[in-house]
Each structure stands twice: as C-alpha cells, then as structure tokens.
Image: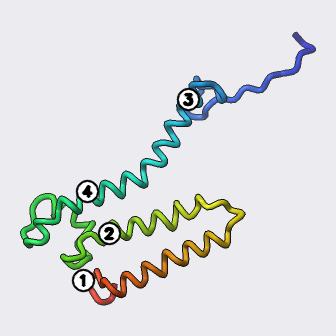
Amino acid sequence: PPDSPLEQVSYMRLDASIECGTDEHGSVTELAFGLIALWPAGSLILFTSLLVACYKPLRAKRPNALTRATAFLHKEYKNKCYWWEAVELARKLVLTGFVLLIPEKNAFLRLVVATLVCSCYAVAIAVVRPYKRVED
C-alpha cells in the first residue's frame, strides 16, 4: 500500500540470491569466518608438517623430491635450523594477526605485546643463529 513505509532489503554482493540477515546468510558468514581463521593456522601447520617430513633427508644431506620442492622453506637456514621458517611464520602471524585481536582501546597493550614478541625473536636469532649467511 502507498501509505506503508518502505522496507530496506540487502543482498550479498557476490551472490544476489542470498538476502542479508537470513539463516542462509548466517551460514555463509560463519563459513567465511571459519575459513578466515583456518588460513593462518592451516598454513603454519602445513609448513611445519612439510618441514618435519624433510627432517631425515636434510640431516642425512641426501635431498629428495620433497626437500627440493620445499627448498623455499629451508634453503636460507643451516641444516640444524631447517625448521626456522615455521618460527618466522608464527612471528609474522602473531604480529600481523593475533595482536590485532587485542581491542583497539588497549592500543598500548598491543604495542607492548608486539615489542615483546620482536625482542624475544631478536634474542632467539642472536642465540640460535639460524641463517647460513652472516649478512642475514
């Protein structure tokens, strides 16, 4: 009727068949948030798993197809520190993702946590010395 107020309806941008605020929209949103959370943790788990699988060939200095395919994960590091890329990825995830989970009103706490992570990482690099080249 002409006297009734207009009702605003929103739809998803990429799939205009899904109306926002419906059960279907809620399930798509939950799936999206789940995959967003899975990506960083999954990449860390995947890289770590690949490095664990490379342990024996790297220690024996007998490269195989897997160690050659995953060289981008370990070639910059000494053989005894083949796993350092997983530590590096964890550091990056903490600094770029998990620190942002601290509410913005606690900005100083974010800075403190990030500074502590960077300081601990710097000490670990100085103690472990994982890189093959001194310049790194």
Q: What is the number of the mark on residue 15?
A: 3
- Cβ–Cβ below 8 Å for labels 3 and 1? no
Quarter of the figure with the C terminus: bottom left
- Mark found first going from the N terminus, 1 or 4: 4
70 horizontally vs 65: left or right: right
Pointer 1 local density, CA inside 10 Å: few below 14, some 14–19, many at least 20 = few
Q: Where is residue 101 in the image (x, y as percent from the top left)?
A: 58, 58
Q: Which residue is drawn at 24% across and 75% down?
A: 81
The alpha-carbon separation of the residues under discs 3 and 2 comes to 38 Å
- Whichever of callouts 4 and 2 sits on the residue coming sooner in the sequence is 4
Q: Name the residue under label 2.
A: 85
Disc nearest the viewer among 3 and 2? 2
Q: How far apart are marks 1 and 4 (CA)?
A: 22 Å
Residue type, numbered disc 3:
Asp
Secondary structure category for the residue under label 2? helix
Separation of residues labelled 4 and 2 (CA atoms): 12 Å
Q: What element carries label 4?
A: helix
**Image quadrant assignment for residue 110:** bottom right
How far apart are labels 1 and 2 at the CA level? 13 Å
Q: Circle 4 sits on which residue?
A: 49
**Residue 9 higher or lower than 69, as above or below:** above
Location of mark 1 (residue): 132
